Amino acid sequence: MKNKNLKIYVLGNLLVEKDSLPLQLVPKLKEVFPRVEFVIVDPNENFPPPGEKDLVILDTVLGINEPKILNLTDFDNYKKTPISPHDYDLLIHLLLLKKMNKINNVKIIGVLPNKSIKTALKSVINLINKI
């Protein structure tokens, strides 16, 4: 299995409906990908962990038409506009870490807010299989 050692950091907030979908997907994703480590994190609390250079993040992303895998260069046009419902600071934080060579690569599995769990799950499974 190609995603045997994959670790995916999951962001979101169950108290904010439009930002809760990634967290709601975790139980089913763990069933489908038992070898993938899904780590629920607060991006404002020591994220990423020291030594983590290549990150895969599952998060809600505004401004996309369909779930997709994004990297930091995909957000170049959005630097002045918040693109994530939980926090604008995550993007700035990741961009600074990249500029300081603290991280090498970031893949963001972006899901749309307010999609059904069933629809989002199918899309996210397909995207994880591409990583």
Image (cartoon, rainbow, N blue to C red):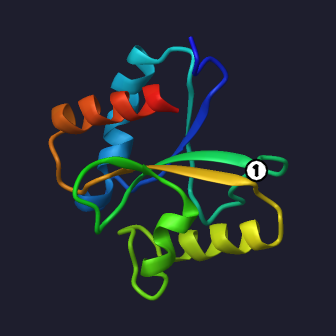
Q: Is residue 97 above or below residue 31?
A: below
Q: Position of residue 100 (x, y in %)?
A: 82, 71
Q: Is residue 64 left or right of residue 87?
A: left
Q: Is residue 94 left or right of residue 80?
A: right
Q: Position of residue 50 (x, y in %)?
A: 83, 51
Q: Is residue 16 above or below residue 111?
A: below
> Residue tagged by mark 1?
49
**Of 37 and 110, the residue lying toward us:** 110
Residue sitting at the far top:
1
Residue sitting at the far bottom:
80
Where's the N terminus, which quadrant?
top right
Q: Position of residue 107 (x, y in %)?
A: 55, 49
SS type, badge 1? loop
Q: Amino acid at mark 1?
A: Pro
**Of 68 and 111, the residue lying toward us:** 68
Residue in the picture at 41% in, 54% down: 12
Quarter of the rendering containing residue 22 = top left
Residue in the picture at 24% in, 39% down: 120
Quarter of the rendering containing residue 98 = bottom right
Quarter of the rendering containing residue 25 = top left
Q: Is residue 111 above or below residue 31?
A: below
Q: Is residue 128 left or right of residue 14?
A: right
Residue in the picture at 42% in, 52% down: 59
Residue in the picture at 28% in, 62% down: 64
Q: Position of residue 53 (x, y in %)?
A: 77, 49
